Amino acid sequence: IITNITPDHLDRYDYQMENYVKAKFRLTQNLRPEDCFIFDSD
């Protein structure tokens, strides 16, 4: 579950929001067919 994506930890991602978002969604690469991915789109 990803509940939010905010710029709080950009220092860990070369201060690039795009890098941060990619890292969060990289989690989906390891999902199995029976897994579930939930994110808040607000």
Image (cartoon, rainbow, N blue to C red):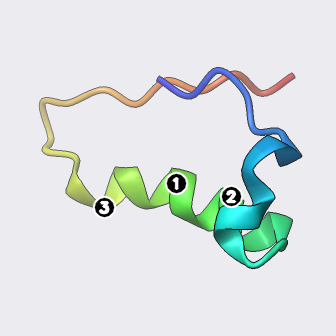
Label 1, label 3: how far apart the Cα atoms are: 8 Å
In which quadrant will I find the C terminus? top right
Q: Residue at x 70, y 22 (%)?
A: 40
- 20 sits left or right of 27 in the view: right
Furthest residue to the front? 11
User: Label 1 crowding class (10 Å Cα cut-off): few <14, some 14-19, many 20+?
Assistant: few
Q: Residue 37 sits in which quadrant? A: top left
Give yes or no for contact between labels 2 and 3 (Cβ–Cβ under 8 Å). no
Residue assigned mark 1: 25
Label 2, label 3: how far apart the Cα atoms are: 14 Å
Disc 3 residue type (three-letter):
Gln
Q: Which of 14 and 38 is in front in this view?
A: 14
Residue assigned mark 2: 21
Q: Residue at x 30, y 26 (%)?
A: 36
Q: Residue at x 75, y 79 (%)?
A: 14
Residue assigned mark 3: 29
Give yes or no for contact between labels 1 and 2 (Cβ–Cβ under 8 Å). yes
Badge 2 or badge 3: first in the primary sequence? 2
- 18 sits left or right of 27 in the view: right
Q: Nearer the viewer, residue 22 or 13?
A: 13
